[in-house]
Image (cartoon, rainbow, N blue to C red):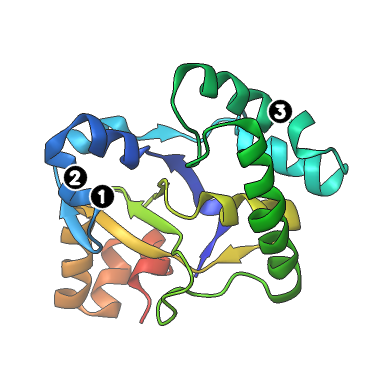
Amino acid sequence: MIDIADINMVIDDRSLAKQHPSYRKIYKTVNTVIDGAFWEHVKPVNGKNVKLIGFREHFVLGVEWKETTLFKQYEQELLKKPNVQGCRDMHELIRLYEEKYDALYHQLALEGIKSARHNVDIEPIYIYIHGDGRFVYTSGGNHRLNMAKVLGLKSVPVLVRGRHAEWQRIRDEYQTLGLSAFEQKYPSLVEHADLQP
């Protein structure tokens, strides 16, 4: 479980996997140690999260999907691409969101976000962990993460898709040093979610 507020970096690993064959393996695995140029694609989360804006418009303000900022973007994307979210036109997209995501939002409002660890029916929310321990959001589970933000949830269960090689070195050092020595060397990291049992 991590605090949603601590997810302040993002990487579009799905697009990277399509553009760079060397990243496909990263995108398809979990708990991978990653070094090199992959991390150059990490960016700060900005305030222009169109999906979050669209979800707030729809779920909080009651705006029809087709009138949301999100669907205005989807409409532009459909002019350039053969499909968006697996849909070939706006009617399919609207039906998908009305049938799948409206139901998912109401389920999350009642039950919160459940862990995907032992449930194959739940798509995990994936993260990477940067060299300094910052959480980097990925393409997996973004609908649920944004719905959690709209609902005001404070924390979400995640699966780690990959860790920066430097962060893995710190994790290994935690195991080698033990809690007391590690706390003296890295006092700000002792409570990090990825170091908890």
Checking the image for residue 128, the label placed there is none
- Percent across and percent down for residue 63 are 85, 38
Name the one closer to the observer, 166 or 52: 52
> Which residue sits at x=68%, y=41%?
94
How packed is label 3: few (under 14 Cα within 10 Å), some, or many (20 or more)? Answer: many
The residue tagged 3 is 69
Picture coordinates of residue 37 (x, y %)?
Answer: 17, 33
Report the quarter where the C terminus lies.
bottom left
Asked whether residue 101 appears in the rendered view, the answer is yes
- Tell me, yes or no, whether the two marked residues, 2 and 1, touch with CB atoms within 8 Å: yes
Q: What's the residue type where badge 2 is placed?
A: Arg
The mark nearer the N terminus, 1 or 3, is 1
Question: In the rendered image, which residue does mark 1 sit on?
Answer: 27
Instruction: Determine whether 83 is above or below 197 in the image.
Output: above
Q: Secondary structure at mark 1?
A: helix
Distance between mark 2 and mark 1 Cα atoms = 5 Å
Label 2's element?
A: helix
Looking at numbered disc 1 in the image, what kind of residue is underneath it? Answer: Tyr
Residue 113 lies, with reference to residue 7, above or below; the image says below
Disc 1/disc 3 C-alpha distance (Å): 28 Å
Q: Amino acid at mark 3?
A: Thr
Residue 167 drawn above or below residue 117: above
Taking 139 as reference, is 173 left or right?
A: left
Q: Report the residue that reaches farthest toward the right.
A: 61
Q: Residue at x 42, y 46 (%)?
A: 139
Element class at badge 3: helix
Q: Is residue 119 left or right of residue 95?
A: left
The residue wearing badge 2 is 24
Q: Earlier in the sequence, mark 2 or mark 3?
A: 2
What percent of the width, then of the height, locates residue 28? 24, 55
47 with respect to 37 (left or right):
right
